[in-house]
Amino acid sequence: TQLLEQSPQFLSIQEGENLTVYCNSSSVFSSLQWYRQEPGEGPVLLVTVVTGGEVKKLKRLTFQFGDARKDSSLHITAAQTGDTGLYLCERGDDMRFGAGTRLTVKP
Amino acid sequence: NAGVTQTPKFRVLKTGQSMTLLCAQDMNHEYMYWYRQDPGMGLRLIHYSVGEGTTAKGEVPDGYNVSRLKKQNFLLGLESAAPSQTSVYFCASSDPIRWYEQYFGPGTRLTVT
C-alpha cells in the first residue's frame, strides 16, 4: 500500500499568519487533488495539479506540485477564520486520501 | 442543481440489522463512488461505479454491497451491520474526462450499537 502522508496533522494559528501544509508519497503519481472539508459537510475540491513543478494560485492559496511528482504543498497567505477546516489531499491514480491537516484559524 | 444528495443524514442501527444508503446526482456524471471517513484516517474508498450497471471494489469493500441500476443513483447496502461500520459515509461523482475531480455529497453519519 502506497501511503499518502499529510503534515502537520493539526495546526492552530492566529488570523493574518501564513502557513504551509504538506502531502507526500513514496511513489510518483499522475495527479493530485486538494480538498477542504468543513464540519458536517463533504469535501470540496480546491485544485488539481498534474505537472511536475506546477504552481497554481487560488486567491490567497498557493498549491505546488513537486518536480518529482511525489509531493505537494499548500501555502495560505494571511489566513482568515474562514480558512478553518480539514485540508485533504488525494492521489488521482488510485483515489487514496491522506489523513488530512486540521487547520484552526483564531481571530 | 442539487449536485450530490445523500439519504438519510443520520441513522442508528443495532448489530445485525441491514440498511441501504441512497446517493443521487443530477450532474449526469458517469462515475460514482462510496467512501467512509473515520477519525485520523481520511477517506477510504469502499466501492465505485464507472457506469450504469457496473460496480467495482475499492480499498475496503468487505461487509458492503452496491448497485447502480440508474445512472443518477448509487446505493450502498449493509446486510448485517457491525460496530466497526460506525462511520461517516460519503458519496461522490465525477465525469470520465476529469474523473479524478470528485463532487461529494453531505454525508451520512451511521452509528451501529
Image: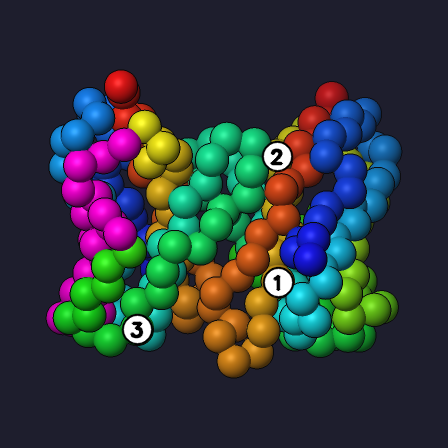
- Give me the residue at 26% from left, 66% from top: A27
- Give me the residue at 48% from left, 65% from top: B101
Q: Which mark is residue B87?
A: 2
Q: Quadrant of the C terminus of chain B?
A: top right
The amino acid sitting under disc 1 is Ser
Relative to B30, is A57 above or below?
above
Q: Secondary structure at mark 2?
A: strand
Same subunit, labels 3 and 2: the answer reads no
Q: Which mark is residue B93?
A: 1
- Give me the residue at 69% from left, 53% from top: B2
Q: Range of the magenta residues?
A: A59-80
Relative to A50, is A21 above or below?
above
Could you tell whether A74 is left or right of B89 in the image?
left
Distance between the alpha carbons at the discs numbered 3 and 2: 31 Å
The amino acid sitting under disc 3 is Val
Q: Quadrant of the N terminus of chain B?
A: bottom right
- Give me the residue at 27% from left, 32% from top: A80
Relative to B76, is B83 above or below?
above
Whether residue A36 can be seen here: yes
**Circle 1 Cα neighbour tier, 10 Å, few/some/many (<14 / 14–19 / ≥20):** many
